[in-house]
Amino acid sequence: MGADRKGGARRRPGRAVAFAALGVVLLSGCASMPDRGDLRDVESTPRQDTGVRVFALPPADGAGPGEIMQGFLEALTSDDPQYDTARKYMTADAAHRWRPEQSTTVLTNGPGIETDCQAGQKEDDSVSCVLTGSRVATVDAQQAYRPADGPYRKRLQLVRNAKSGQWRIDGLPDGVVMGKSDFQRNYTSVDKYYFASNTAVGTSGQPVAVADPVFVRGKVDPMTQAVRSLLKGPTAWLRPVVRSSFPTGTALQGDVTGLAPDDQNKLTVPLNLKASQVAAGKCAEMATQMLFTLRNLAPTLESVELQGRGGARLCDLPEERAESAAWHGADRRPDFLYYLDGKHRLVRMQTGSTGTGAVAVPGALGEGGKRLQSVAVSRDENTAAGVGDEGRSLYVSSLTADGSLGDALVTSTGATPADRLATPGWDARGDLWVVDRNPERPRLKVLEQGVSKPEDVAVPGLSGRITDARVAADGVRIALVVEEKDGKQSLLLGRIQRDGGTGEGISVDGLRPAAPDLEQVSAISWAGDSRLLAVGREQGGVQQMRYVQVDGSAPDGPAPGSLPGVKAIAASEDERVPLVAYSDDGIVRLPSGAQWQKVDKDGTAPVYPG
């Protein structure tokens, strides 16, 4: 429950959050409340400086029910760690029962108050107030964001103390509610990291890091919040496909708060573990999860030390060892950008190049014999897959001088190129994914290690036809573009479940919307550990390119510069790498802080490895 107020937006996950308040602002519920039964959004004081911690004022002596409601809602959007001021607007019993951590409901605007709660305050000792609004999302007890819609309507009961004559809230639902702009000011997104349960990289056997986005209160000890959330384990949606290296029951010691790196950019985390409980290799994985997670909030963090009971040192992990302890897509800068030139050959140019020259890749795919329409390059950049023959055939070849093409590994019998094979993609395991868009038999297929017999992937609960797919580097999440019978499209995120020896094969489960407001999606690409880049349009809108958070939350920062006629896009999990697109101007790229630049007017189908 909270008041919507204008002001700063949520910080980007990759930027540091201030650990010391720059100042304090006190809020009071000063907006006037009408005394008739209409609706009124809770007014609030705009705040321009998001580095200032905000605290609300306690209830004024003799405040009526409407003023109590106003002050209470203001208190819920303050930076009070335990909501102590908000509890002062309640009776003692209600303050004891209330559990604000159970959920956060996000509304389009601040919650409206049905002001009939003003009626009877002169002669009655109890009154009901109703909060109303339009839902945008819910953040659950695990701090996971989920888009929502529909009306919001909750009743609160207020009573007047017989002795003091003061009105207080006596009955209210658990959780809090606030407007969208308040949510963006109060909360920041953090990617927790776990390891894929059934995925390892090549012969190295490295575990693969998987991002699990949650929201923490941005100015209320965010690092400690993030650590506690990490230790509690993955969110319910991701849990079936990941594991944590922290032993069950691991927690911070005692009432630890205020976690922050020291002046050497090292963070010490005291845990309730005995040294005998933690093997060296397992401790390194634990510290890796911790470091990857906390770099969201402290990008300059260089090392993590885990301590056990009595201050015993469990392990100390510097950043460079963390990057070798686990495969992490955002730390893997691609060597080359790849695309098809005017002769339908696969060509490449160095990622950091500022020029426009590209050279054909070594091997058969660089020769142009199959007139390729789309391509995908493996994460290690040693192998490539190409769709040729006007979308009918999928070929795989090594990127070496002696790389050759055998028979097509997957074929489609769709009537037109648009009904045949879509752009393929690789995950960190080395598995190759491709969609056959044939309306008569649409299928999602995977080829383990890019060479095995194609296997159909089940997608339970799917109501439409998959027209495009992009597998995440971690191999456990996949973005799908699904077309319904009415022609509308949805961008969905699913988790990849592998049989683990059960013989049930591979499936994509847990489908959920990543961009609920888009009804047409023409191109997608992963653009970070928990972010996609999409080209599409809203109902009645025009084509736009924008970032999409995989949990459906609002992205931070501006969208890429507008670009007409976009047909394909390429981004990397490493967000420092320039965006690349195929548009009416051919291949163009967008270096950081610059405008779109032409690369090859005859080029098509740009991709980074993946």
Image: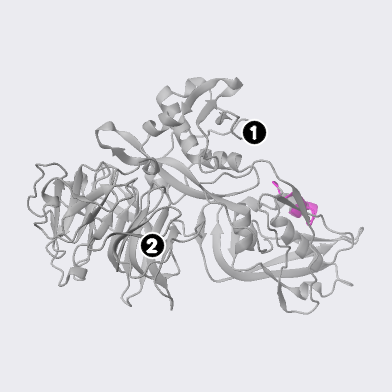
Does the magenta run of residues contain 401? no
Query: Residue drawn at (55%, 31%), measured in percent from left and top?
Result: 265
Q: Nearest the camera: 430 or 76?
A: 430
Which picture quadrant has residue 416? Answer: bottom left
The image shows residue 133 at horizontal and vertical percentages of 62, 70
Give the SS element for disc 1. loop
**Mark 2 surroundings within 10 Å by alpha-carbon count, few (fewer than 14), some (14 through 19), many (20 or more):** many
Mark 1: amino acid: Val
The image shows residue 606 at horizontal and vertical percentages of 27, 57
Which picture quadrant has residue 481? Answer: bottom left
Query: Residue drawn at (78%, 79%), measured in percent from left and top?
Result: 36
* Label 1 with label 2: CB-CB less than 8 Å: no
In this rendering, is residue 356 above or below 277? below
Q: Which residues are magenta?
A: 81-94
Residue named by callout 2: 534
Q: Say left or right for 454 vs 468.
A: left
**Mark 1 surroundings within 10 Å by alpha-carbon count, few (fewer than 14), some (14 through 19), many (20 or more):** few
Query: Residue drawn at (29%, 37%), measured in percent from left and top?
Result: 201
Which picture quadrant has residue 522? Answer: bottom left
Q: Nearest the camera: 5 or 365?
A: 365
In this rendering, is residue 106 above or below 198? below
Inter-mark Cα distance, 1 to 2: 41 Å
Nearer to us of marks 1 and 2 is 2
Mark 2: amino acid: Ala
The image shows residue 598 at horizontal and vertical percentages of 32, 60
Dot label at residue 122? none
The image shows residue 10 at horizontal and vertical percentages of 58, 55
Whether residue 152 appears in this view of the structure is no
Residue named by callout 1: 256
The N terminus: image quadrant: bottom right
Give the SS element for disc 2. strand
Whether residue 2 appears in this view of the structure is yes
